Image (cartoon, rainbow, N blue to C red):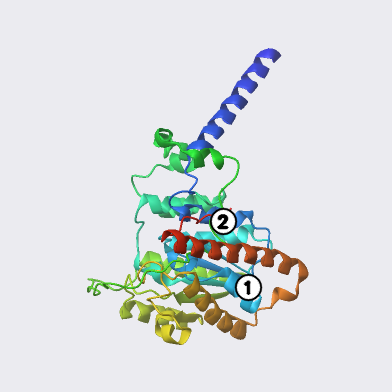
Amino acid sequence: MRLRIVKISVAVVAFVLVFAALQRLLVPKYASFALEGGLIREYYSSSMDQDLILIGDCEVYANFSTIGFWENFGITSFIRGSPQQLVWHSYYLLEDTLLHARQKPKIVVFNIMAMQYGEPQFEPYNRLTLDGMRWSPTKFRAIAASRLDDESWLSYFFPIFRFKEHWRDLGSDDFRYFFRDPQASINGFMIRSDTMPVGFLPQPLPIANYRFSEKAYYYLNRMAELTREHDIELVLIKAPNLFPHWYNQWDEQIIEFAGEHDLLYINFLNYTEEIGLDWDIHSFNAGLHLNVFGAELMSMYFGEILQERFNLPDRRTESTVAEQWNSMAQQYHHMIALQLDEIERYGRINSFLIG
């Protein structure tokens, strides 16, 4: 009887190990495509304290340089951004951040572009945010809020069922990053050193209803309540871009919400000249997002506001913190130099991964 129990136990353990290994092999590594898919999980590999957390969609991970905040103001920061991150995604990422943070941030910045969406949009975008989150009750609630009707609960618990067909096109990255995840950012900021000037800019079309949905407001209210409970300053921003369009009717609603909740709201679209942005040299994709040089200008402008208004500490005087951040700054400047060299040699960037 005892021998039978041992055999069954060994078989179960072997099955679990094989299943886990297959899942690890088949789940995308986001190393050669859709690098943004690895951003959410990168947060957990950082052991450093962050005074500033930015959450939101591509307008945060492309438009603000974490090293820019550090080198100019000594502000420690992390960007918890992901493509088409919806308001409920952002709220649960905030919950998750406070759950895992060794020290709670002093300021949370939320980019409000996603307020235009009142329902879940696309399963692949859900994956780019949710799959990278660590398991907790917070992640479970995030899945419940985000899942489309045709999405399987089981595939979130066991992603192998979502990506089981990936075995057909396994590549070298799947084996290279089997034991470690690729690094695509510096504390959540993705470096792009190339430039694509603004060409044709489509005219904004009127929409039937400009009012934000109850669901969007519900999670924005929860965000305000959660930060208040933890004595954290919440700042709302609209990051600069030329497209997609940000309507005045939307802006008026955010101004009203910020006033009712005594929050700072900055629409950076109103300050592009003051910031020094030139869309013909500071964007890598014709005005949708900033390149690293535009992001540095944004961090310089925004960092000064944050430091003056909220008296954020300059942590460059703390030797341990400075050593860690200066090491990341070396990676940052090396990657910029490498990308610029590739642009000069080949006319394009070949290197996007930092590690």
Q: Nearer the viewer, mark 2 or mark 1?
A: 2
Q: Position of residue 116 (x, y in %)?
A: 35, 68
Q: Position of residue 152 (x, y in %)?
A: 40, 42
Is the residue 251 above or below the residue 22 in the image? below
Image disc number at residue 354 = 2
Q: Quadrant of the rendered structure where residue 74 is?
A: bottom right
Quadrant location of the N terminus in the rendered image: top right
Toward the front, the furthest residue is: 345
Q: Secondary structure at mark 2?
A: loop
Residue 91 visible here: no
Toward the right, the furthest residue is: 319
Distance of label 2 from label 1 (alpha carbons): 18 Å
Residue contact between numbered discs 2 and 1, judged by CB atoms under 8 Å:
no
Image disc number at residue 38 = none
**Total tally of numbered discs in the picture:** 2
Residue at which label 1 appears: 70
